[in-house]
Image: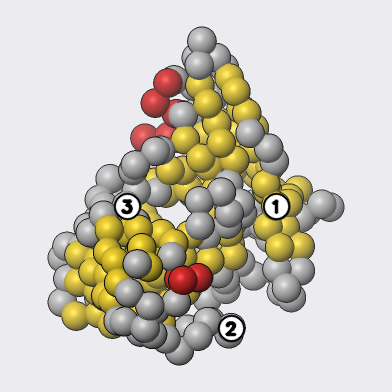
Amino acid sequence: QVQVVQSGAEVRKPGASVKVSCKTSGHTSSDYLIHWVRQAPGQAPEWLGWVHPTTGGTSYLEKFQDRITMSWDTSTTTAYMDLSSLTYDDTATFYCLREPAGGALYADFWGQGTLLTVSS
Amino acid sequence: QPVLTQPPSVSGAPGQRVTISCTGTSSNIGAGYDVHWYQHLPGTAPKLLIYRNNNRPSGVPDRFSGSRSGTSASLAITGLQAEDESDYFCQSYDIGPRIWVFGRGTKLTVL
């Protein structure tokens, strides 16, 4: 069974950076994508981008291109999302999720979420 | 960013049937992209409930079903149980900005 476990809640000041981890296990193949989405209170989840564990390739939502980095550590099967130049509007719960092989365009497993609070 | 439209809340008594709608546009659901549904208890990991409009992953009871037509989709839950009380949100793909799009979620209350 695939498991996805994220790092704990974070508090940052405006202008700072945050790095969220997403430890995965139980995959039976290496052909999947890890996506990141965030959900602000009362809002729909917002897709941020994905990282391909096999190639390291990434794709980001255009408005985040300059301040987001997604990466993958093959040795620990852990994905990372680094977001810089934080503002109060970045306060949200961040989720990593797995898209199965074959261009499924849905997530079969999600992490439990990481709450990011941006506060001075 | 495009957002799918869902009712904020629905409710039903145990044993009843409820439906949750998910309305998109011609650039996502109306363009033929599949709709997927997730069940989410706040503070926990969302769970895949229905994928590709009407398919249930292993372990999801057949009380849950989905459909898609035109620019909309629906999730139906029959034989409501107390344990079904949760948030449900839909998801699809939008060809315009080439991104995943989500609904805000619908809170189901079992009376």
Q: Which residue is the site of mark 2?
A: B59
Is disc 1 in the same subunit as disc 3? no
Front one among A46 and B58: B58
Is A37 situated left or right of B104 in this image? right
Q: Which residue is the site of mark 1?
A: A5
| Residue at 55% in and 69% down | A108
| Residue at 43% in and 34% down | A64
Using the image, name the chain to which the residue with label 3 belongs: B
Using the image, name the chain to which the residue with label 2 belongs: B
Point out residue A78 in the picture as x, y percentages from the top left corner.
73, 50
Question: Residue B104, which numbered label?
Answer: 3
Q: Quadrant of residue B93?
A: bottom left
Q: How far, Cα to Cα, is label 2 from label 3?
A: 25 Å
Is B67 situated left or right of A99 in this image? left
Element under label 1?
Answer: strand
Look at label 1 and name its amino acid: Val
Front one among B15 and B100: B15
Q: How far, Cα to Cα, is label 1 from label 3?
A: 23 Å
